[in-house]
Amino acid sequence: MNTGIIIGIIVAVILIAALIVLGIMLSRRRRISLTDRPTTQVVDGSKPQVDRSGGYKAGSGFSFSQGGTALAEPPKPAQPKPAQPKPAQPPVQPPVQPPVERTEVDGQPGVGDDASVPRDSAQRPIADVALPDIEAPDLEVPDLEAPESIEEQAPAQPADTTSTAPSGADLDVTTPEATAETAPAPEPYVAEVPDTAGAAEVETETAAETAPVPELVEPVEVPDTPESATSVVEREEIAPTAGRLGRLRGRLARSQGAIGKSVLGLLGAGDLDEDSWEEIEDTLVMADLGTASTTAVVEKLRTELATSNVRTADEARALLRRVLVEQLHPELDRSVRALPHAAGPAVVLIVGVNGTGKTTTTGKLARVLVADGRRVLLGAADTFRAAAADQLHTWGERVGADVVRGKEGADPASVAFDAVDKGIENGVDVVMIDTAGRLHTKTGLMDELGKVKRVVEKKAPVDEVLLVLDATVGQNGLTQARVFAEVVDITGVVLTKLDGTAKGGIVFHVQEALGVPVKLVGLGEGADDLAPFEPEAFVDALL
Ligand SMILES: Nc1nc2c(ncn2[C@@H]2O[C@H](COP(=O)(O)OP(=O)(O)OP(=O)(O)O)[C@@H](O)[C@H]2O)c(=O)[nH]1
């Protein structure tokens, strides 16, 4: 054999070996062979324990900021206005799936349920209310359409809403100390609710024409000086916010795995063909992510898998985590604008469909603020449900916050206005206004909500409008969110009852569709079961 042949054979062998190695590498890259993550962890160094926490643990305390609004506030360069979140793709709204028909059978609240689900107390009828003229030349009011049905017929009410005399008769300013002495139980509602048959369904136009401001009840005498109270209602000790967040672990246990396990399972099934990707899409849609978020997540996953070197379960999990966290826009400002201005208190409006947890959230948030040393005043502008003001009053007592309340059937805008007025007068840091449950199907109520905000803005800028959504209603929540966004400019979402759902995808959907960040999450009925929303912690709970 001559040398040439030998060299040729060697080269051929090397080439074949190189091709084999290359083939193995390519095949490994295409196939994701996942190995299970250890399910136990050593907690105390000696005893392995299974972590059943569900994973959600807010890593930090609540973040509060000062609102920047259109009202004449002295510019504060040191505290830049928080960036307003922008919709990722405003023109391309994902198609909204029709809301699931909900009835009282399943016991869960939903849009339109006010008509079918009786709550725990009588509701006042939807009444047209005459409100102060909202034209305020010195204010920049958001471009809300003036509700024609009520607005047009409002009699020439004095535009000067600083006059609180008429509404003051409807109001009841309570302090925990004061009521302890003179009112052992919360003042009962003594309002005469018009009991005309079917009144709840009727827009009482004539009422508005004849009664500029509803004067439904006699004012309740409340001592206006704390000195008159000799005993003080015992307030609950409020745990420091930082420490108590750790107790929220485990509340999301039911959500764990809904997305993670199935998607990771598919990713680990080997080469992903179109059917597999479709299945991943279906899984994400089923978890309420919505079409836009699902498409974005799947596209990112496909791109990343094609270019990165994902071969293990941990690598696949890390990739999925990163993609989901990115989709939740961690860059959005999630601080609650509840810090006072130089000129007055911050004003926070709590809105949402009935039963979603508005009053509970108002109380929980007030508790956090009080724990942080803030003086809080609560405005019970939910005059629709009889027990709502009592519920808020109880929260006020628990956390040590004054409550301004109206009589049943009182004008909610008037109550809200007077709450802010009182807040300014008392020098509080935050006024939180709890509003009545709203139905997007009831134009009158939605109009009323718009008016609440506009009337309040005559007195002080509204820094934060928190929409409370029930995580368990899924897609229906988005339908609600859109309607509310049209009536009042929502600045943040509170997603309640996350402890009661196996789906967390609605967070993606709401943010994508509205461009409004989820700022807080409700993880139970307890007073401390409110946590700041953190994308990373939330995704960890999902996977
Ligand atoms: N499991 C759970 N329950 C919650 C949460 N938030 C509120 N709830 C419960 O939901 C129910 C309704 O809460 P409310 O605060 O009365 O709801 P609302 O929106 O004020 O209701 P309306 O006054 O009728 O408009 C109450 O039983 C609350 O305890 C939460 O995060 N998790």
Image (tube, rainbow, N blue to C red):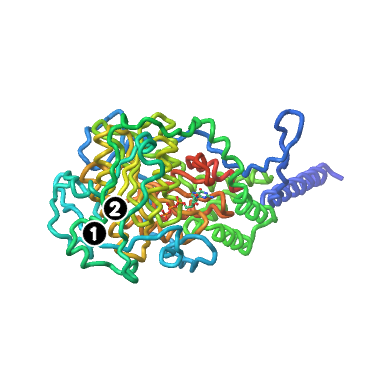
What's the mark number on residue 357? none
**Residue at x 59%, y 54% (from the top left corner):** 502
What is the count of numbered marks?
2
- 29 and 300: which one is in front? 300
- 106 up-or-down from 86: above or below: below
**Can you see residue 368?**
yes
How packed is label 1: few (under 14 Cα within 10 Å), some, or many (20 or more)?
many
**Can you see residue 83?**
no
Say which quadrant the N terminus sits in. Answer: top right
Q: Position of residue 112 (x, y in %)?
A: 41, 65
**Residue at x 40%, y 38% (from the top left corner):** 335
Q: Position of residue 212 (x, y in %)?
A: 18, 58
- 11 up-or-down from 213: above or below: above
The type of residue carrying mark 1 is Val
**Which quadrant would residue 462 be assigned to in this image?**
top left
Mark 2 and ligand 1: say if the CB distance to the nearest ligand atom is below 8 Å.
no
What secondary structure is marked by label 1? Answer: loop
The residue that label 1 is drawn on is 129
Circles 2 and 1: CB atoms closer than 8 Å: yes
Indicate left or right for 302 with 372 as reference.
right
- 36 up-or-down from 241: above or below: below
- 99 and 455: which one is in front? 455
The type of residue carrying mark 2 is Pro
What secondary structure is marked by label 2? Answer: helix
Q: Position of residue 489 (x, y in %)?
A: 32, 51
**Residue at x 81%, y 46% (from the top left corner):** 9
How packed is label 2: few (under 14 Cα within 10 Å), some, or many (20 or more)?
many
Q: Position of residue 207 (x, y in %)?
A: 22, 64
Indicate left or right for 335 with 303 as reference.
left
- 321 up-or-down from 102: above or below: above
**Spatial separation of the CA atoms under disc 2 and disc 1:** 9 Å
What's the mark number on residue 412? 2
